[in-house]
Image: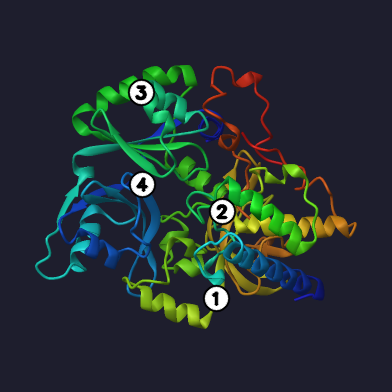
């Protein structure tokens, strides 16, 4: 994984992971239906997406989504549930007799994701220079490809929905042009480790434990000022106040999902997700810790049966190279002449 | 819980709450303070701040906590999440008390 992570963190990587569903929802009742389903405000510019989640009636997160306005409709780009489950969820919350059309773009398109500090440069090579200026959390269509600038790695990231009829040709062109960037194909473990290092929510790891946005520390993705599926449960939880919260930890030695976390001999939580960071040469994990232990900067906890010393930290744990890359000044070919800060200290 | 850990957590919660209040009252973030989690991104996906807000945030931190942050405190390394700002304030206080390394995380590069 070190080679793969090195490409993602220092160059360019591509992948067909993670499993992602892209629905286009249109019709006169598209807004009202999505407003009922979506915990975030839907007011975004045309071509813009907003990161949010989908909740069940208990306020527990079951999907990690972007929602965006697309001319007269909306895009719902989701990780977690299958397309069938997602369509059923949306339809089940539509009013009777609603004017609603739902198109599953993933039935006709394949996802190709390009990630890394120089991903913008390769995107410019394969899709044209106009794409280099695409703002973060916007999408654009070109050559029948839907290109979303997003990503959950902390680096420049582009998710491309490519028509299946042309995906083989596109992949061949990507790999051909990517040779100049030492392009590496990476898999889901690399993406998930990158998300862990940068504090991006992962529906397949910490997100699989039936936790609420408050417990996951992602309240910024939801609103307390509108009604939606799960909103009543969130308001009741808010009135009670937080009792535990997902907290990032680092350790020299390995910890594993399910490991208990201790202060002295008191169990204060458990590990939700864990992995080794080759960039930091350390283990990074997320634990759900009880109040008041759930704060960063504490070095006095241990985890697992081996009682590995862990330190709670504020993510991101890396100083991402993409923070310092300016497409007007930098290129992959001349990177050796550039002076960037260390990716980890 | 040891008195030292209890004291640290209390101080961290106090700083966190004051940073949340700054974000709402001085940077006009349209959220209630209790809905701003420590790991909330300051820019882009999270609170949607911009570079002008970053300058205001530094001024606000200096006013509120009596800090004198170096100009390069605008560095992208620290201006990432609410929790990173809390880290910055606590590290500064620790350094000022002679307990910490003043180079971490106070020496910051200004990003491109």
Disc 2 secondary structure class: loop
Disc 3 or 4, which lies upstream in sequence? 4
Marks 3 and 1, Cα distance to the nearest angstrom? Answer: 48 Å
Q: Are discs 2 and 1 located on one and the same chain? A: no
Marks 2 and 1, Cα distance to the nearest angstrom? Answer: 22 Å
Q: How is the image coloured?
A: rainbow
Label 3 neighbourhood size at 10 Å, few (<14), some (14-19), many (20+)?
few
Q: Position of residue A141 (x, y in %)?
A: 28, 35
Which of the numbered marks, if any, corresponds to residue A128?
Answer: 3
Answer with left or right where residue A75 lies relative to residue B33. left
Q: Position of residue A7 (x, y in %)?
A: 52, 30
Marks 2 and 4, Cα distance to the nearest angstrom? Answer: 18 Å
Residue A224 sits above or below residue A178 on the image: below
Q: Are marks 2 and 3 in contact (CB under 8 Å)?
A: no
Which of the numbered marks, if any, corresponds to residue A131?
Answer: none
Chain name for mark 1: A
Marks 3 and 4, Cα distance to the nearest angstrom? Answer: 20 Å
Disc 1 or 4, which lies upstream in sequence? 4
The residue that disc 4 covers is A48
Chain name for mark 3: A
The residue that disc 2 covers is B42
Answer with left or right where residue A317 lies relative to residue A210. right
Q: Position of residue A28 (x, y in %)?
A: 15, 59
Residue shown at the point (20%, 59%) measured from the top left: A30
């Amino acid at each position: 994984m070190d080679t793969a992570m090195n490409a993602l963190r220092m160059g360019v990587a591509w992948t067909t992971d993670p499993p992602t569903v892209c629905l286009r929802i249109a019709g006169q009742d598209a807004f009202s239906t999505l407003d009922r389903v979506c915990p975030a405000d839907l007011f975004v510019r045309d071509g813009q997406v907003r990161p949010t989640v989908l909740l069940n009636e208990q306020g527990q997160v079951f999907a990690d989504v972007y929602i965006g306005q697309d001319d007269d409709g909306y895009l719902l780009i989701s990780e977690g549930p299958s397309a069938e489950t997602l369509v059923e969820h949306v339809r089940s919350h539509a009013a009777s007799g609603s004017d609603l059309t739902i198109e599953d773009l993933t039935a006709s398109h394949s996802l190709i994701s390009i990630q890394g500090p120089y991903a913008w440069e390769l995107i410019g090579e394969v899709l044209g220079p106009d794409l280099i200026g695409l703002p973060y959390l916007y999408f654009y269509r070109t050559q029948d490809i839907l290109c979303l600038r997003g990503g959950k790695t902390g680096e420049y990231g582009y998710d491309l929905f490519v028509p299946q009829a042309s995906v083989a040709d596109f992949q061949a062109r990507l790999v051909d042009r990517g040779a100049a960037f030492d392009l590496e194909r990476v898999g889901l473990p690399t993406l998930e480790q990158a998300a862990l290092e940068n504090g991006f929510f992962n529906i397949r790891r910490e997100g699989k434990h039936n936790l609420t946005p408050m417990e996951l520390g992602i309240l910024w993705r939801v609103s307390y000022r509108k009604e939606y599926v799960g909103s009543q449960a969130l308001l009741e939880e808010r009135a009670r106040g937080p009792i535990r919260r997902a907290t990032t930890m680092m350790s020299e030695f390995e910890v594993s999902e399910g490991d208990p976390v201790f202060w002295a001999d008191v169990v204060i939580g458990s590990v939700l997700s864990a992995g080794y960071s080759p960039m930091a040469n350390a283990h990074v994990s997320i634990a759900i810790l009880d109040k008041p232990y759930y704060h960063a900067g504490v070095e006095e906890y241990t985890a697992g049966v081996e009682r590995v010393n862990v330190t709670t930290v504020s993510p991101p744990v890396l100083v991402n190279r993409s923070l310092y890359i300016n497409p007007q000044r930098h290129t992959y070919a001349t990177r050796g002449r550039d002076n960037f800060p260390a990716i980890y200290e | 819980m040891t008195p030292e850990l209890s004291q640290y957590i209390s101080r961290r919660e106090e700083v966190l709450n004051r940073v949340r209040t700054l974000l709402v009252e001085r940077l006009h973030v349209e959220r209630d303070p209790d809905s701003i989690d420590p790991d909330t991104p300051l820019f882009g996906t999270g609170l949607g701040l911009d570079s002008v807000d970053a300058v205001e945030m530094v001024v606000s931190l200096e006013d509120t906590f009596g800090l004198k942050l170096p100009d390069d405190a605008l560095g992208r390394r620290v201006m990432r999440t609410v929790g990173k700002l809390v880290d910055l304030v606590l590290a500064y206080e620790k350094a000022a008390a002679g307990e910490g390394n003043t180079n971490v995380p106070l020496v910051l590069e200004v990003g491109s």
